[in-house]
Image (cartoon, rainbow, N blue to C red):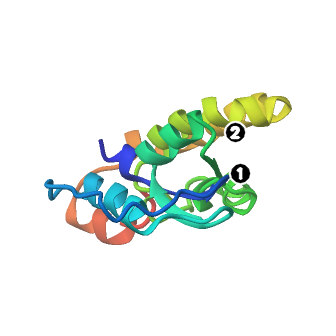
Amino acid sequence: MKTESQLVKSRFNGDIPASPTYASDQESPMSAIISEILLNGVEKSTILELPWWLASTLLQVNFVDISLPRAFNQRSREALQMGPWATNLCELSPFFYRFSIKLLPVYAIRFLNDLELQIQFHCTSWWFRLDLVFDFRPSCSALKKSSGWL
């Protein structure tokens, strides 16, 4: 569920009119986001950061276009390729690999030529980091020295 709550910039493809009569009796974060959109409406080309679960659902019915999250852009990929052990994935995205597995099918449709490179990139960076994970010894001194790499 935590990967589903990752925020993704989403651009609306059409207007969603405000519905002042909409009332939600639930207090969950999910209903709060939907209530905000339905109560205030959204104009075409408005960009909002939506959680992945909502953005992916709206993408399937062509209400939004999503942009690649910052953790997966060209600059982040280059940093991972140059030094996968020196890049702090928790800072980029707390669930980097799980979230990338959810993103790959969406972007496979758009960037079909680049899909093989994307998969190769993720596998390579994962293998480089796997060595460090197995070599990591959870002691106080090790945590202080290399606390930023995981």
Judging depth in this view, the residue of 72 and 35 nearest the camera is 35
Judging depth in this view, the residue of 24 and 70 nearest the camera is 24
Q: Which mark is residue 121?
A: 2
| Residue 63 location, quadrant | top right
Badge 2: how crowded within 10 Å, few (<14), some, or many (20+)? some
Q: How many marks?
A: 2
Q: Residue furthest right?
A: 113
| Residue 47 location, quadrant | bottom right
Work out which quarter of the rendered image holds the C terminus and state it.
bottom left
Secondary element at image label 1: helix
Percent from the top left, x then y, of residue 97? 49, 41
Q: Which residue lies furthest to the front in this view?
A: 21
At horizontal 62% and vertical 29% (from top left) the residue drawn is 105
Percent from the top left, x then y, of residue 111? 79, 36
Percent from the top left, x then y, of residue 118? 71, 37
**Contact between labelled residues 2 and 1, with CB atoms less than 8 Å apart:** yes
Badge 1: how crowded within 10 Å, few (<14), some, or many (20+)? some
Percent from the top left, x then y, of residue 45? 68, 63
Q: Residue 81 carries which label?
A: 1
At horizontal 73% and vertical 63% (from top left) the residue drawn is 75
**Label 1 to label 2: alpha-carbon separation:** 8 Å
Residue 130 visible to the viewer: no
The answer to whether 126 appears left or right of 90 in the picture is right
Hey, what amino acid is under mark 2?
Phe
